[in-house]
Image (cartoon, rainbow, N blue to C red):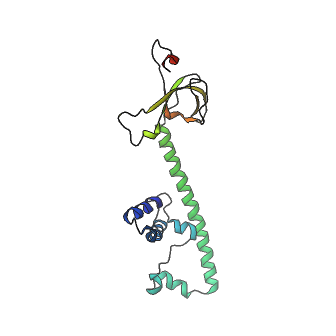
Amino acid sequence: MSASSATTVTTVNHAHDWDTKLAAALWAYRTAEKITTKQTPYFLVYGQHPILPIEFEVPTQRTLDLRRVSAEESQLYRLQEVMVLEERRREAEERTRRIQLRRKERYDQRIKPVLLQKGDLALLYDSRHARFPGKLHLRWMGPYKVVEVFPNGSIQLADLTGELLGTRVNGWRLKKYHGLVGKSLTSWF
């Protein structure tokens, strides 16, 4: 569960007192092991697993061992913990990098190449209606003229009068406009 979903669940279930539950939701997120790193965020930041308040009342092996060591042993133990922490952070970083690379490869397999060229006419998908499409909503705007196709897949468009759109558009939001056979576009506008 991500921090945002934990806070969303907390907010929905406790609409009037969500702020009192927020600390508990964040604690649960920070002390839960993540699939990507195989570690808890708490451990990656502080280098140790959290000591719960109950462990001071009912001593555990970990809290008893920390009370019995001398200052010199404590320093040596802490140095070893820091070295282990650095290694675990490197492992978590490498694991995250590998997972992100796999996700990118899977995502890139689904991407269709942009088949538009400079001078083509294209229709622009109106993403405002993607989540709640109505029966009669127009999902495609245009046609627009392709002014330039960039290597990263973005495309600069202009309307039929030649005025550039304010921003570039991602190529997946466009489809080629084939027009009306035997009709001029300007006669329709």
Seen as rendered, the residue at the extreme left is: 135
Residue 44: x %, y % from top left: 55, 66
> Residue 79's quadrant in the figure?
bottom right
Depicted 5 relative to depicted 136: above or below: below
Residue 173: x %, y % from top left: 49, 34
Which quadrant, please, contains the N terminus? Answer: bottom left
> Residue 146's quadrant in the figure?
top right
User: Does 75 sit left or right of 49 as displayed?
Assistant: right
Task: Identify the residue at horizontal 50%, vertical 15% (top origin).
Answer: 184
Residue 38: x %, y % from top left: 48, 62
**Total residue callouts:** 0
Residue 25: x %, y % from top left: 44, 67
The front one of 118 and 183 is: 183
The front one of 105 and 185 is: 185
Task: Identify the residue at horizontal 37%, vertical 33% (top origin).
Answer: 136
Seen as rendered, the residue at the extreme top is: 182
User: Does 17 sit left or right of 117 as displayed?
Assistant: left
The front one of 70 and 59 is: 59
> Residue 58's quadrant in the figure?
bottom left
Task: Identify the residue at horizontal 37%, vertical 64% (top origin).
Answer: 13
The front one of 143 and 116 is: 143
User: Does 163 sit left or right of 184 as displayed?
Assistant: right
Depicted 66 relative to depicted 6: above or below: below
Task: Identify the residue at horizontal 35%, vertical 35% (top origin).
Answer: 135
